[in-house]
Amino acid sequence: MIVALTFLIRRFIVGCKNMANYSIKFGKRKIKNPFIHGKWHYLYRAIDADGLTLDIWLRKKRDTQAAYAFLKRLVKQFDEPKVVVTDKAPSITSAFKKLKEYGFYQGTEHRTIKYLNNLIEQDHRPVKRRNKFYRSLRTASTTIKGMEAIRGLYKKTRKEGTLFGFSVCTEIKVLLGIPA
């Protein structure tokens, strides 16, 4: 039930953003949690220019293959953006170059300027906290996606200026077609 709800809420927040007139800020963050087998895990996230989360992906490794898969997943879901902003991690840069060789991101500018990535770095903060409920990679991923979905609803209403009178429960009921 939680997995289905998370998926529905994320679809509502992201919407149909299949247009090439947007920019992506892309980041990764280490998550240390003893309940995911006591090992480091890496959260790949992409946000648009407005700060709304486009996609997140929890991986065991931080390598070129993981960055390649995530960037390819983004371009298939949302088409090519005008600009991709990343940090200077060699794995992301090589994955981006590899995707350009295969015909993706042809009209996209790749920026690695230090301060352009601040928005996504600040957006990572709530996820970095430890959580006792992560029993496996799958449950951690689902929980983080759910947290991101609720935060996305909050961010969307703040952007539109409808914070007063807003209720997450009402939004979920409307989303699921339940009378409010």
Image (cartoon, rainbow, N blue to C red):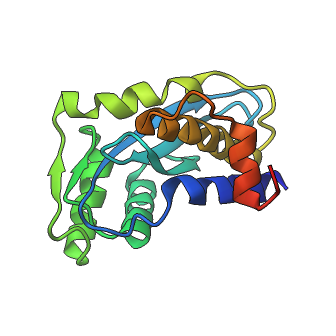
Q: Is residue 156 left or right of residue 68?
A: right
Q: Quadrant of residue 32?
A: top right
Can residue 137 be seen?
no
Percent across and percent down for residue 100 are 21, 69
Does residue 90 sit above or below 72 in this rendering?
above
Report the number of discs.
Answer: 0
Can residue 128 be seen?
yes
- Residue at image location 48% in from the left, 30% down from the top: 124
Percent across and percent down for residue 9 are 65, 53
- Camera-side residue of 156 and 142: 156
Percent across and percent down for residue 119 are 33, 31
- Residue at image location 21% in from the left, 33% down from the top: 116
Farthest-out residue, right: 1
Q: Is residue 20 left or right of residue 131?
A: left
- Residue at image location 68% in from the left, 46% down from the top: 171
Percent across and percent down for residue 24 are 31, 50
Q: Is residue 130 left or right of residue 35?
A: left
- Camera-side residue of 29 and 40: 29
Does residue 150 sit above or below 130 in this rendering?
below
- Residue at image location 44% in from the left, 33% down from the top: 161
- Camera-side residue of 20 and 100: 20
> Quarter holding the N terminus?
bottom right
- Camera-side residue of 47 and 58: 47
